[in-house]
Structures are given as structure tokens and as C-alpha cells.
Image (tube, rainbow, N blue to C red):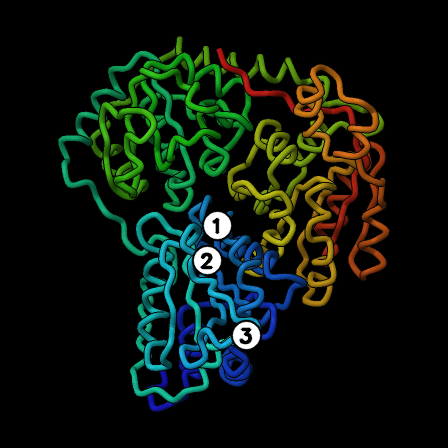
Amino acid sequence: MEMSPCSGAKTLALMLSEYGVTHLFQVPAVLRRTMVEIERLTGIKRVRPHGEKPAAYMADGYARASRRPGVCMAQVVGALNLCAGLRDAALAHSPVIALTGGRDPATKFRKVYQEVDDVPAFETVAKWNATVDDPERIPDMVRQAFRVATSGSPGPVHLQFAGNEGQVDAGAIEAGALVEARYASVPPHRPAPSEMADVDRAVDRLRSARRPVLVAGGGARWSGAGPKLVRLAERLDIPVATTLNGKDSIAGGHRLCVGVVGTYSRASANRIVSAADLVCYVGSETGSMSTHFWQVPPPGTATIQIDVDPEAIGRNYPAAIGICGDAATVLDLLLTRAGEPVTRPEWTTEAGQAVEQWRAEHGAELLSDAVPVRPERICAELTEHAPSDAIVVVDTGHAGMWMGGMFDVADGQDYMRSAGHLGWAFPAALGAKCAQPDRPVVCFTGDSGFWYHVAEIETAVRWNIAAVTVVNNNASGNQSKRGFDRAYGGVQTERGASDLWKFTMVDFAALATHIGALGLRVTKPRDFAPALAQAVESGRPSVIDVVTDIDALAPLAVVD
């Protein structure tokens, strides 16, 4: 690392490079001098999307795919748009670092062009929210940003650089630009529980329970704990459910996997978790989505909760045993103390039967040859034909419901989903592909979600970001149908549907082709697999527009 004296811009450019950042997602103009030094000194790519919010989503997808901090940037007038995009990263505990311009202390309150105090807005979405008012502070503030973003339960960080474009980076500094390589990825530390007696008690409870279930959450994913979770489940013969954020912790076809639990879920998971006499949460905050508003499991069910964040333990279900530590580390300790294998033939048979019952209930739709195409059939096709090493990126809303319940993750695949923002998936998939250029990235969204950031097709073409985006195109946001029927007191009027959630049917394949991407339109189920293979093999940004049934509604959560 080059030492001072040098400019703040040069120091910042070199530090980002040393921390392993390969892409910046930025809307100009911000930190202009740093951008120049990045070109001169590093190999970092400066990706310019068509808005601050998709820049934040791209950085988020980059972070989740690589487990390294994703960096997004905007000048002061666009900072609030960037802030809005950070909310999904905050909800998913994703280590995104946002760099923005801000007010200069020398001209505060004088009505300088674009003067707005954005710092308070970031308080709700950032683990750490700080200002850089002196170039001398750049090295230590950047170090702290990476420390906070990656440590403990990871999450977004915001640094506001003085000057509407962050012009503070032009100043000369004397401070040494030390980089702490440990904090370049998640997790930088793997804390172990302080009380081994709690680990032994947990093993005893897991062994003695008649109907135990393991529930893997997003914390298990960030820890890379999936393989150890599966080993523990196999050793003690325990069914495994996952949250949406932990879906890739176990292969969907594993004999012990019962599916995603909660609201955007698979009925088999809700049924088995509801019937459990002990639920062991691994890296899950037990929020409303993963418990269907704290109904699954029923209140009073005995729980064990393993989490790196002590504040999460017992928040929603009083824990019989709470273990604070890194998920993979705690699972390793449980495995060393687990003893001889346990068999629970009645319980695991019941779990397997619940999965088979679910498949029987939805088999007609999963295999349907209907035209327009059923969304369930798309999910089944993706289960069978998505590349074995794919990163699968999924939107929220109906897309999250379809894929959460109907798609089975394979060993070797990653699954990333929107934590709440419709439209997140497409730009996040581009960020994921930037982070993992050698792996296929397949995005699943609906036309309602795709419209949010459809302009990023051009970004993908300009940078040749060869993600494959599958659009469930029913010319509507038809997840809203049920809600508006209720609001109308029965069945909504045709005008209500037309005004509130129906769209114009657009051929996204033609639009993508016009912009320079590969566009493929699918109107029959049998044509989907060849289109997916063509898109993956093309090495180009691709959009597969699937014309689907507007009357197809995702199944609601089951509560037994």
C-alpha cells in the first residue's frame, strides 16, 4: 500500500482495491477525483446504472453473491434514492457500503446548490452512519466502514463525504492507509459460545425430542453453515425447514428437507414445524415472514436459538436454550458432542409424507402444459434445468411466493431473494454476475417487478453482464387481486382491476433485443427449457419473457 503524503482520492482508490472491491456501482457525479485515481491505479470497474436505487441493489447482489462488501455511490442530491435502495440490504443483513456526497461545513445553511442534510435518513438503514469532513479521516473511516459492514450480523454502512460531490477527497493527507484484510469478507470472526454447558444442553434436547425440527435462516447462509447443518440433521435424523434467506442451506431434494416455512412457504414445512415439539433456529430472527406472523410454530413451542446477534435470541419465541455465536462454529460444536447417530423413523416418515402430499396437491400445476403458461411450471422447469452451479436471484411478491414454495435448490446452487423490495431482483442479479462472472446467474421476476428497473437492460448490454432474467409476464401485478377483492367487500369491479393492478402486455423479449440483449419469448411450456439453455450458453445479457396466466395465484400459507 502506497503511503502518504498523497491525495485523499488516491488513498481511497487504493484502499478499495486492497479490500478486494472489483466493481463500484455509482451514479455520477460523486468522488470524481477518486474515480480518476481508480482508473489510473486499480482494475476496479466503475459501473454506471440508470439510477441510485438500482446502484444500491447491484451492490447488494454483489455482496450476497460474493460475501464481500458491495460498494455503491451517489452525489448529495441522489443520496436519498441510494438510501431507499439500502433498505433491502438492511433487512437481509447484507454488507453494502454506501459512499455519498454531503454538506460542506464551510457552506452549511447558506443555500448551497443541492444542500440537504441526508445523514438522518440513513440512520434507519445503516449499522453505522458517519461523515468524513476532513481528508485525513478517510483511511480510518474507510477501515471502520469495512469492519462494521462485515462483523457480527453484517449490514449496510454509510459514509458521507463533505462536498456535494464528496470534494473532500481532493485534499492531501498524511495518515497511513492501512488496510485490514480480515474485514474484506463475511464473516471476519467466528465467535464461539461462552457457555459450553448450553451446547451440551442443546445436544441433549435435540437427541431426546420426539419431533424436533431445524430451521435455517439467513445467518446460516452468511456463515456458510449449510454443510454442517445437513451433517447435524443427518446425524440426529431431524427434518430441516428453511427461511427464504436460508433456502440454499440444504438441497430441496434432500430426504430431510421439508421446504420454506412461514408466509411465502411450502405447506409441508408449515405442517411439520407446527407439529414439532422442539424447533432449533440457526441464524434466524424469527420474524413475521418466517413464522407466518408468529403462528408457525405455535406460541409455547420449545425452541433453541443460535445466533451471532445476542439481541435476536428470544425476541419472538422465548428460548429454552439460547446460544450466541457464529452459526457454523456452533454447529461444529454440536456435531462434536452429538454422539452416536439417532433414528426417528416415524417422525422423518411423517415429514417425507408431508412433502409428498404437497407435491400431490400441486403436481397438476407443476407439470401443466396449459397455455398461457402456469408459473408453477416455470418453477419446475428451473428446478430441473437451471445450471447446477447457478446463482438464483428472486424478487419479492408473487415471484417470491412461487419460487419460495415451488423451486427446489440443488447442491452447488445459491439462492438469493428480495427481502421486501419489488424490483430488487433484476439489478441485484447484475451485481451478482459482476461478483461471480464465471457462474451462471438466473433471475426470476414478474413483469411488475421488471418494470421498476427495466432500463438496466442497457447497463447489462454496455458492460456485457451476462445474467439471464426470466420474466413471469401476465401483464399485471395480480398478487393484489385477493387484497382488492377483500377491499371491495367480495369481488372487485373490473374498473378496479384495470385501474389498480392490470398493465399493458409488452413483449420484453423484443424490448431486450432492441436494446442489444438476447430476447427470447416463451408462450408454451415445452419451449422454456430450450430457451433457458440458449440464454445460459449465449454468454450475453438475456431476457426470457414467459407469457403466463393472469388468473394463477400463488397458494396462501398453511397453518395447521
Residue under pointer 3: 30
Label 2 crowd bin: few (<14), some (14–19), many (20+), radius 10 Å: many
Sequence-earlier tag: 2 or 3: 3
Amino acid type at mark 3: Val
Task: Give the distance between the C-alpha atoms of the residues marked 2 and 1, in whole angstroms.
Answer: 7 Å
Question: Mark 1 or mark 3, which is nearer to you?
Answer: 3
SS at circle 3: loop
Say which quarter of the image contains residue 160: bottom left
Amino acid type at mark 2: Val
Image marks 2 and 1: residues in contact by CB distance under 8 Å:
yes
Residue under pointer 1: 89
Which of these two is toward me, 95 or 370?
A: 95
Residue under pointer 2: 96
Report the label total.
Answer: 3
In this view, 22 is above or below 299: below
Label 1 crowd bin: few (<14), some (14–19), many (20+), radius 10 Å: many
How far across and how far down the image is residue 237, in percent? 36, 21
Q: Residue at x 77, y 45 (%)?
A: 544
